[in-house]
Amino acid sequence: MTKPLLHMAGMSVELTAGKSTVDIVCDIDLELNRGERLGIVGESGSGKSMTALAVMGLLPQRMRVRGELSFDGRNLAGLGEADYCGYRGRRTAMIFQEPMTALNPVKSIGAQIAEGRRLHLGETKADAEKKARALLDRVGLPAPRFDLDLYPHQLSGGQRQRVMIAMAIACEPDLLIADEPTTALDVTVQAQILDLLDELIEDTGTALMLITHDLGVVSEMTDRIAVMYAGRIIETGRTDDVFARMAHPYARGLFAASPHGAALGSRHQGDGRPRLNAIPGIVPDPFGRPSHCSFADRCSFAEADCRQAIPALDLINSDGNVQHRAACFHPRERMVAP
């Protein structure tokens, strides 16, 4: 049996604040194979980005990984910064949410793209810059309009995002993490960026971990999906299966709150446009999470047992090697239309 590229088993991210310690991310069990596409969705504060930062070894101070986190068979938990520097950028790379803050404002875009190849692959300055030029062409920033000597502030938001993608794929990593890669872009540019990512992944066989709020993007771009809430995975499986069943009330709530889900529903505003169904309440603060189901206080289907324990991520359906699981005490009883 082929070993997974990325493996997490009981992986938690622990935060120490003063004398208090809390798990920001709790008991994550996930695997990602080579060439596979995994979508991670959930509201802000669900733990999506922290999970990605744990994989990259970029957690803030006072945070540490517990449990098993391995990449291509190598344990990453507790890995030193020097070792991470050799792995980060070369074997795995990340596209951050806001390229203007992720890019270095005092370095040219050509220097920033070439840097990874010089550090990781030992290329000369001339060879690295030649590759940087080819990468800019590949992501839709052709010469002579987009010179290597341009700086981030001279580009639009969509163009900066393309530079970020060129940096991320410069060393042909095995895993690409895209954290809300289209959040700050208009609809047309979003579609262009997603098409670009899709093309690059098809060409290279790179595994993708896509973090987003947009369920429409996940449905088009991923093979599997993990829905996160309050630091835990509450539903996971093949993307088509999860969208068809939505066994957890939170997953159904996310779908109903999206434009795509509202369009399929029956509720409309006075002007005929579909009405979004908001989930009441907010994601609980990590220091105030209950000792039972964290979604119970927001769930209209919660019963007494939902406020007595944390539900396990139990099997809903099995399709070959991919299992559909949900952390809900009453998943099948809640299969109602949004």
Image: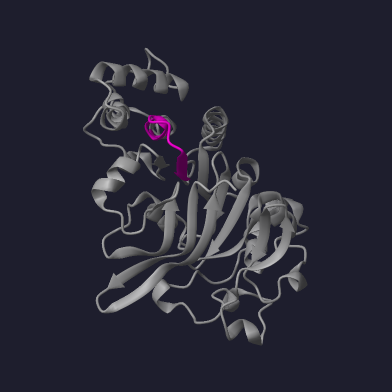
Magenta stretch: residue 167 in it?
yes
Q: Quadrant of residue 192?
A: top right
**How many marks can you see?**
0
Residue at x 43% of width, y 19% of height: 137
Q: Is residue 173 left or right of residue 225?
A: left
Q: Name the foreground residue: 79 vs 116.
A: 79
Asked whether the viewer can see residue 67, the reply is yes
Using the image, determine if residue 271 lies above or below residue 103: below
Q: Which residue sits furthest top?
A: 144
Q: Name the foreground residue: 238 vs 100.
A: 238
Residue at x 65% of width, y 87% of height: 304
Magenta stretch: residue 8 in it?
no
Residue at x 36% of width, y 68% of height: 14
Q: Quadrant of residue 120?
A: top left
Can you say which quadrant of the picture contains the C terminus?
Answer: bottom right
Q: Which residues are magenta?
A: 164-178
Q: Is residue 110 left or right of residue 49?
A: left
x then y, percent, for residue 87: 34, 42
